[in-house]
Image (spheres, helix red, strand yellow):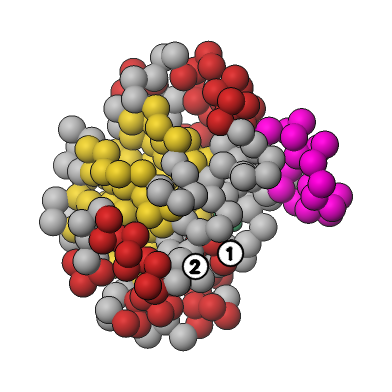
Amino acid sequence: MRFASIGSGSRGNGTVVQAGDSLLLVDCGFALKETEARLAKLGVAPQQLRAILVTHEHGDHCSGVRVLANRYRLPVYMTAGTARAKPLAAVECPIIIDSHAPFVIDDVCIQPVAVPHDAAEPVQFVFDWSGRRLGVLTDLGAITPFVKSHYCACDALLLESNHCVDMLARGDYPSSLKLRVGGRFGHLSNAQAADLLEEVDAARLQHLVIAHLSEKNNTLERVQQSLADVLQKMRNVLFACQEEGFGWLTIS
Ligand SMILES: [Zn+2]
Ligand SMILES: [Zn+2]
């Protein structure tokens, strides 16, 4: 099993998961040409994708989904709430998932995990394949006990560490946006990401990817400071970036 990213952040997201012969794309927040070029960098042709999974309807996760899916006749797995959003309404092959029920694509078992985020019916995903477990967790404002229970025993984890609370407070966002981003239905702060990492089985994690970093309200240094205690226990830590995402990481 391996995973990679075509970009991570508020200007577009996309995570590619390969388990055996199955290639899945989680979210697509880029225009078609851009997506094709970014996938090509990973050696992936869109025709090879088995499906697209959508976490929620925010533009940085879904703006490219409809065109890509319809162009290459890909099924799109999403919750009923997500599917109702305008940008996804014209998807030709939607497959509605229950936000709490695991589903299977080929031989990959996928557990949707409902998260507190300001979207209609947002979920994140945990992938199980052949004894390996990958967690993808971004776009949530709080770590609920429910979320924690699903992500504590992963072999690899892609985790949001969106903002530094001080930078957000002192930055130039209007106060309504500050409240949204920092609120219970917004995004994870560095401190919240650190809290979750304290709870996970660090010895089991082969890869930790810190993702969805805010370009305005965070810096690499701030993340490293906040996560210093936990990062020193982790073997392989990577920071996903908006422009490049990150290359393939193999879970053995
Ligand atoms: Zn997002
Ligand atoms: Zn979002």
Question: Would residue 167 be counted in the magenta stretch?
Answer: yes
Residue 52 relative to residue 146: left or right = left
- Residue beneath label 1, please? 58
- Note whether 190 is above or below 22 in the view shown: above
Question: Would residue 224 be counted in the magenta stretch?
Answer: no
Q: In this orientation, which residue lies closer to the viewer: 117 or 14? A: 14
CB under 8 Å between discs 2 and 1: yes
Q: Indicate the amino acid at tag 2.
A: Cys
- Residue beneath label 2, please? 62
Percent position of residue 82, x then y: 53, 69
Please tell me in which quadrant of the rendered image residue 213 appears: top right
Q: Main secondary structure of the magenta part?
A: helix
Q: In this orientation, which residue lies closer to the viewer: 177 or 172? A: 172
Percent position of residue 226, x then y: 61, 22
**Disc 1 residue lies near ligand 2 with CB under 8 A:** yes
- Note whether 148 is above or below 241 in the view shown: above
Q: Indicate the amino acid at tag 1.
A: His
Q: CA distance from mark 2 to mark 1?
A: 6 Å
User: Bounds of the magenta span?
Assistant: 164-182
Q: Residues within 10 Å of mark 2 (few under 14, many from 20)?
A: many
Residue 91 relative to residue 179: left or right = left
Percent position of residue 105, x then y: 24, 61
Q: Residue at x 23, y 35 (%)?
A: 251
Q: In this orientation, which residue lies closer to the viewer: 27 or 140? A: 27
Q: Residue at x 68, y 33 (%)?
A: 164
- Residue sitting farthest toward the left: 21
